[in-house]
Amino acid sequence: MKLLSNSILLISVILLTLTVNKANAYSAFSLQQVVQQDTSKRDTSKVKTKNNSDLDQKIEYKADDSVRFSKDESIIYMYGNARVIYGDFELDADYIRYDQKNNLIFARGSTNPKTKRYVGRPIFKSGTDGSAIADSLYYNSATTKAKVFGVFSQQDDGFFSGGQSKKQPDNELHIKNMMYSTCNLPHPHFGLMISKGIATEKQIITGPTYMIIEDVPTPFALPFAFFPKQNKRTSGIMLPTPGEDATRGFFLQNAGYYIGLSDYWDAKIMGSIYTNGSYEASLNTNYIKRYKYNGSITTHYASTRNGIQGQENIGKDFRIGWSHSQNPNASPGSTFSASVNLSSSTYYKSTAANQTYDLGAIANNSSNSSIAYSKVLAGGLFNFSTALNAQQTFSSGEIALQLPTFNLNMSTISPFDSKNRSGEQKWYQKITVGYSLQGNNNITTNDSVLFTPKGLRALKSGLSHNIPISMNFTALKYLNFTLGGTYNEVWNFQTINKRYTTFSDGTYTSRQDTITGFKRGGSYNLSTSLTTKIYGKTKEFKNLGNLKQLRHVMTPSVSFTYSPDFTDPSRGIYKEAINQNGSFITDPNTGRRLTYSVFENSAFPGSFSGRQAAIGFILDNTTELKVRSKKDTTGSGEKKIPIIQGLTFNGSYNFLATTRKLSDISFSGRSQFTDKLGITYNGRFNPYLLRDSIGGDGSRIILEDRRYFWQGGKYFPRLENIGFSFDYSLNPDAFKRKNEAYDATKNQIEKQGMTPLQSEQLNALNRDPNAFVDFNIPWNFGFQYRFDYSNILGQTTITNTLNFNGDFNLTPKWKFTFNSGYDFKNKGLAPMQLAIYRDLHCWDMNISWVPYGAYKSYSVNIRVKASILQDLKLSKRSGFYNTYQ
């Protein structure tokens, strides 16, 4: 272990020097265009000359100020916005001198006498290559040699500036004292100084190369370097990030190899090693087919060791991710997508969310994965879709798989109507029929036994058919009637059989056996419904300031449903409970024989209820307030404020039920008072009284009575549950900008495919409003509150949570963010995360701090903004593992 520790420490010191010395292939004559040249104005004055190949070439030139000649007219002097075009070589500058005798062109700028600034620098272009700008240059039109001083040009995300470069006839380029940087300023904040080098078509060989920060040379240097210069994707070694963790020791993170398989597929194989014996390995691939599809696949394995040597706690964790999206125009009528995120239950906690320290990801207790395909069939009459889904619960280790599900839905048709019908529909032509088929194969088990025979035996398979029939018509202009019914049938391939054992005190237990085999069952119901709208409007307010009018809209709906008794054992779906003596067991609550459904744990339990004739009622309410708009200067403008949006009450009464004929009355609604404040609420009323009773041990217990609340002298039903939540933001522009950033990232992903980094960014933007840092928003503060109250049989429970987050600019370049909450149960602050951001123009700095809690940690990152130099960074991190030692 000491040998491993010393080796990693030595390599870390070497890599601290090497990791910051990465450069891209560069050619001064293979640059992106930085200045648009005007090719529409060409002087008609032309000079004929010959090059070495004896091919006639014409030089075109012009100048806005003046054009002068030497006495023998062998030298041409051009002043003021001068231009020279020679073959595929184009040159613009404030001053150009052309020596026809020696075939030598010289160009430079000039110093403005008023501003003392150097202006009119030469801008040159050769062939199909982009343009570049320089302080001055020489160009030999006969040999095509060139010597450039103080070049400034852009290539991809980087900029080359300063120094000298000399182009040879064989297109070999010699460079000296040239700086490469991702800073776009004429005088960059940092850069890699190439003291001298030679660039050919396929490679760049340099002498000493070192980093300069704010004009100060640093010791981060290489004595020489060789860079392959390819025009296609190439493979290569990825240098690791060295560092130290207080618990796991020195480390080398994310060392690996990049494989450029093709322009459509690549892969990264990476690994990390720690001196305490922990290690990690990962494989990341991206693929794309233009105008068809794109995606990425990620696999990660981690072995973590914590504790004293010899008594370590060793954990094995994994994660598998797959993202796939299809271009909507690739295959009209069909879609295919994938979003897979499978991991061991302790992965995010053991790896600190893959070393991101994202508290939202660490605290997340579940994950969902899906792979879906859909297709439109028969000219749009049918829609087929299938999906593989997985839901994980990390705290319990439970995993639920659906492998797969599928749906076949038929559009609603009118079988008795005619396409060539003229005139109004007859009553039978209004009859509509639909059909849907659903299939399911699911497993719910613990992830530790998922791929064992025990886990596979938990597989449940089945089919469900649904046929709705309905007819709609209007009566008395305002009453909308619906008549119809629904037939349901399920086909299951696993059923159950229960064996009961009774005891002397009347209690019983049961054991359940799973029986493999096909069994079907059907049910149906008949229904009718009536709905309308009732509008209520107050008179216009005259003496209430900006208030003008109140409007209330009610939408009542009444329905009646009838279905026979499908729980009768004679129908073959329900069985009567029989004990070990062959006797029937009586249900103590109803006094009837105890029964159970053979589809109780099947893929589709079905809707096999007892006989019912029930009336259902729904009342939806909307209330709007009309006020004068302050933004309208004419005084005639007005706006509507939705005080209540969708306050809905619903319940039912079953005439044929033996107990609880009236159901609970539930309600839900929402209100959006302002752009900053919105509230949602829900609850449930119980219409029955409570009564005291004596338990078997003599204790007092509370039971639900069969009497309604009005029979006990109560005016209102008992409130059994209520909850409400609201979000508030003091600066709604901050969330607007955050949503715009989310949409932009999502659109980029849909066009180019999702990389692992983009996936993390997208998830972070969903979880944390502070994940998007915008220096254009000077401040923001928002919070989310949730309150829940329940009173079940006298047992009262109250829960409430408060989360808050915000940020503010200390200066135009410094931003402070925070994210925390209040734990009402423990009467203290929830885990807090603080961060400070500093905009350093071409760099940025991020200091993140979790001051207390299980994930107490801090990290400091200073890195280049440009993606091309993302590995150029300085990081310091304190691991969260220290908390457990």
Image (tube, rainbow, N blue to C red):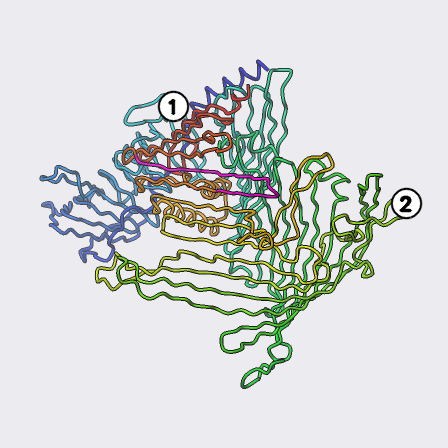
Residue that appears at 30% across and 38% down? 184
For numbered disc 1, what is the local secondary structure? strand
User: In the image, residue 126 lies at what x, y percent?
Assistant: 31, 47
Disc 2 target residue: 581
- Chain-order first, disc 2 or disc 1: 1
User: In the image, residue 46 lies at what x, y percent?
Assistant: 20, 55
**Relative to the observer, which residue lies in front, 309 or 254?**
309
Q: Is residue 169 visible?
A: no
User: In the image, residue 302 lies at what x, y percent?
Assistant: 60, 30
Q: Is residue 374 visible?
A: yes
How many residues crowd mark 1 within 10 Å: few (<14), some (14–19), many (20+)? some
Main SS of the magenta part reads strand
Three-letter amino acid code at the position of disc 2: Asn
For numbered disc 2, what is the local secondary structure? loop
Residue that appears at 23% across and 58% down? 40
| Circle number at residue 305 | none
Q: Marks 2 and 1, Cα distance to the nearest angstrom? A: 87 Å
Three-letter amino acid code at the position of disc 1: Phe
Q: Which residues are magenta?
A: 787-809
**Relative to the observer, which residue lies in front, 481 or 783?**
481
Q: Is residue 270 above or below residue 560?
A: above
User: In the image, residue 148 lies at what x, y percent?
Assistant: 27, 37
Q: Nearer the viewer, mark 2 or mark 1?
A: 2
